[in-house]
Amino acid sequence: MRVFGFADRSSPRKGWARACKLAGIDLLPFHAAGRHGFGQEMNVRQGIDEKAAGEFGGWSDTSLMRRTYTHAEQTAEKIHEAQMRGLRAAEQATKLTLFSSPDGKRKGKS
């Protein structure tokens, strides 16, 4: 009996390899593309917590997902934005100006 029209579980590899070739991209095994894509999108880009993404994605060990299938993106920008959010929140809560640049203008988004 064929599942999804394929004779066996390795049959989709031919179509995947052909699609990569036609797209002009290096062949990336579809398991890695799917697992990496899912882990990266859910954890890094969408901010879904590791436990929820890991459970939904079928990982029994979510640390494996974090170590293997996710990678940092736009590190400096994310850290600077988080620091500025924290600074703005502290200034709003205390009604104090906690930081300004030497020219009197705040750098980054305000």
Image: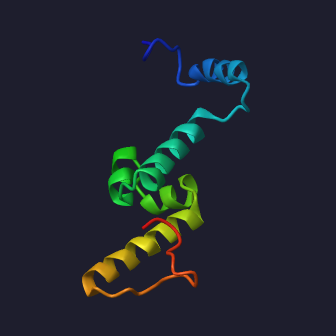
In this view, which residue lies farthest toward the front? 103
Q: Number of marks in the image? A: 0
Q: Check the image and tell me how it is coloured.
A: rainbow
- Which of 95/51 is in front? 95
- Which of 56/76 is in front? 76
Name the quarter where the N terminus is drawn.
Answer: top left
The residue shown at (73%, 25%) is 24
The residue shown at (35%, 59%) is 49
> Residue 9: where, in percent of width, then height?
53, 24
Q: Is residue 10 left or right of residue 87?
A: right
Q: Is residue 22 left or right of residue 16?
A: right
Name the quarter where the C terminus is drawn.
Answer: bottom left
> Residue 3: where, in percent of width, then height?
43, 17
> Residue 23: where, in percent of width, then height?
68, 22
The residue shown at (57%, 21%) is 12
Q: Is residue 61 left or right of residue 101?
A: left
| Residue 10 versus residue 51 in the image, above or below | above
User: Could you say which quadrant of the image residue 76 lies in?
Assistant: bottom right
The residue shown at (39%, 71%) is 85
> Residue 48: where, in percent of width, then height?
36, 54
Q: Is residue 67 left or right of residue 14?
A: left
- Which of 19/88 is in front? 88
User: Could you say which quadrant of the image residue 97 lies in?
Assistant: bottom left
